Image (cartoon, helix red, strand yellow):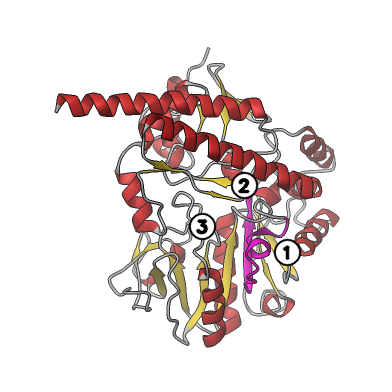
């Protein structure tokens, strides 16, 4: 039998860090990553035959659960006709229609192959449509790894008023690439200048743990963008078609000018999209001067999978998603309370987060303070040892899917009770030793 450790060692020889996305290397939690052999519904099996209740669900892409037979059938059927053509298809038109029909104010979309590509292209579109250069984003909001958006807060940002730029968040990103990017604190409405092209925001922050928007925050962004003529961009790669049929813009009642989507719309295959009004999108080639292209954009397998998923996401599906998330969040809170472990379990619709400590984070600094407590690695491995797979990083959220049953969630909660008790016992022992 091939082991996880053997595969990891093989991967280290031919893949940087042994993985194709950094969080998978387990650097944040320690240990050797598990390598998935197969998945079905709410579960994944690793190459050693261990089964886990999976709350990662490909970071939210598998909203129906893994290998849903209806999605599998749609992909198999599409594959018999070819996997890519480099030409338009009925499937991409149909998926675009379905996306636009569900989101209030969204008139046109361009399909791409990832969330990063969607955000990168949407920012270029916003700059082209406004004739302006500056981009405002929020600390802790992740919009993919394009250079201009891979920036952290700089010293020019103070008290929510725009400064003069940001510093790169990665080697290889030049100062020039982020010179027109300004980073401000989440849940703070900045005062904009009239050279701002676009304000990019996660309408529910889900890349620094789960931090919902404060009351009036999204409304304030809308008003401030309107005041100076900037565009408001909702990055709904996570929230799109998960928190509601019309995404976060439907749930919040705030309508942006530009949207980014991903994950759910691909049905588990690589897919992203960005869109807006017909007027904004008219700046995009071939109609306008803003160039964007992609050989695999609108891939027929991905559009078949995505269309099938969207068809199945009716009102009952969203009610069940929310009920699963509520049961999970309540069960985890009770587990920590019973053990006397200070922890916060925020929930926003069907999204569930976890912060250790007594305070509820409202921005990236307060979320980072929770992570700095260092509790997550112990909790992660304790859950994994008990058959529950969480994301191997403390800034991710949990994604209960439509495939998670009451029994699955009960297993998760029971495991949490055991791990929380173990954490409490360890803390008590450490205190006694000191």
How far apart in space, not on screen, are marks 1 and 3 (Cα)? 20 Å
Q: Nearer the viewer, mark 1 or mark 3?
A: 3
- Residue farthest top in this picture: 1
**Magenta span:** 245-263
On screen, 125 above or below 2?
Answer: below
Q: Which residue is mark 2?
A: 350
Q: Is residue 97 visible?
A: yes
Kindly identify which residue carries mark 3. Answer: 212
How far apart in space, not on screen, are marks 3 and 2 (Cα)? 12 Å
Q: Callout 1: helix, strand or loop?
A: loop
250 falls in the magenta region: yes
Residue at position x 80%, y 43% from top? 82
Rounded to the nearest whole Å, what is the CA distance between mark 2 and mark 1? 18 Å
Tag shown at residue 72: none
Question: Residue at image x 48%, y 52%?
Answer: 207
Location of residue 387 in the rendering, given as x and y in whole percent from the top left corner? 52, 22
Q: Quadrant of residue 378?
A: top left
User: To which quarter of the image does residue 139 belong?
Assistant: bottom left
Residue underneath mark 1: 103
Q: Is residue 383 left or right of residue 100?
A: left
Quarter of the image for the C terminus: give it. top left
Q: Position of residue 131 (x, y in %)?
A: 55, 85
């Amino acid at each position: 039998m091939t082991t996880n450790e053997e595969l990891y060692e093989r991967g280290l020889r031919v893949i940087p860090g042994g993985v194709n996305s950094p969080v998978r290397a387990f650097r944040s939690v320690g240990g050797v990553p598990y390598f998935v052999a197969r998945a079905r519904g709410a579960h994944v099996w690793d190459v050693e035959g261990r089964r886990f209740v999976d709350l990662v669900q490909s970071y939210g892409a598998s909203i129906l659960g893994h290998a849903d037979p209806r999605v599998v059938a749609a992909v198999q059927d599409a594959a018999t006709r070819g996997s890519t053509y480099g030409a338009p298809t009925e499937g991409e038109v149909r998926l675009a229609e379905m996306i636009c029909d569900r989101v209030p104010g969204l008139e046109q979309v361009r399909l791409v192959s990832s969330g990063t590509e969607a955000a990168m292209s949407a920012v270029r579109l916003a700059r082209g449509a406004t004739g302006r250069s500056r981009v405002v984003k929020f600390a802790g909001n992740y919009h993919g790894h394009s250079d201009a958006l891979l920036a952290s807060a700089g010293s020019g940002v103070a008290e929510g008023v725009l400064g003069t730029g940001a510093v790169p968040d990665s080697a290889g990103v030049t100062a020039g690439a982020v010179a027109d990017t300004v980073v401000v604190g989440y849940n703070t409405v900045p005062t904009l200048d009239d050279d701002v092209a676009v304000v990019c925001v996660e309408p529910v922050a889900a890349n620094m743990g789960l931090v919902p928007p404060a009351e009036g925050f999204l409304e304030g962004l809308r008003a401030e963008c309107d005041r100076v003529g900037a565009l408001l961009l909702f990055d709904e790669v996570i929230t799109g078609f998960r928190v509601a049929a019309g995404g976060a813009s439907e749930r919040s009642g705030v309508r942006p000018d530009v949207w980014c989507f991903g994950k759910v719309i691909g049905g588990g295959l690589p897919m992203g999209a960005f869109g807006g009004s017909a007027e904004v999108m008219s700046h995009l080639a071939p109609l306008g001067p803003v160039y964007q292209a992609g050989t695999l954009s609108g891939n027929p397998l991905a559009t078949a999978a995505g269309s099938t998923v969207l068809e199945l996401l009716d009102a009952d599906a969203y009610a069940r998603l929310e009920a699963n998330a509520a049961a999970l969040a309540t069960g985890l809170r009770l587990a920590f309370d019973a053990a006397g472990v200070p922890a916060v379990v925020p929930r926003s619709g069907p999204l569930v987060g976890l912060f250790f400590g007594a305070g509820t984070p409202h921005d990236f600094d307060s979320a980072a303070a929770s992570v700095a407590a260092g509790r997550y690695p112990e909790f992660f491995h304790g859950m994994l040892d008990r058959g529950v797979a969480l994301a191997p990083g403390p800034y991710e959220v949990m994604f209960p899917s439509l495939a998670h049953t009451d029994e699955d969630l009960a297993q998760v909660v029971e495991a949490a009770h055991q791990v929380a008790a173990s954490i409490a016992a360890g803390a008590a022992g450490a205190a006694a030793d000191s």
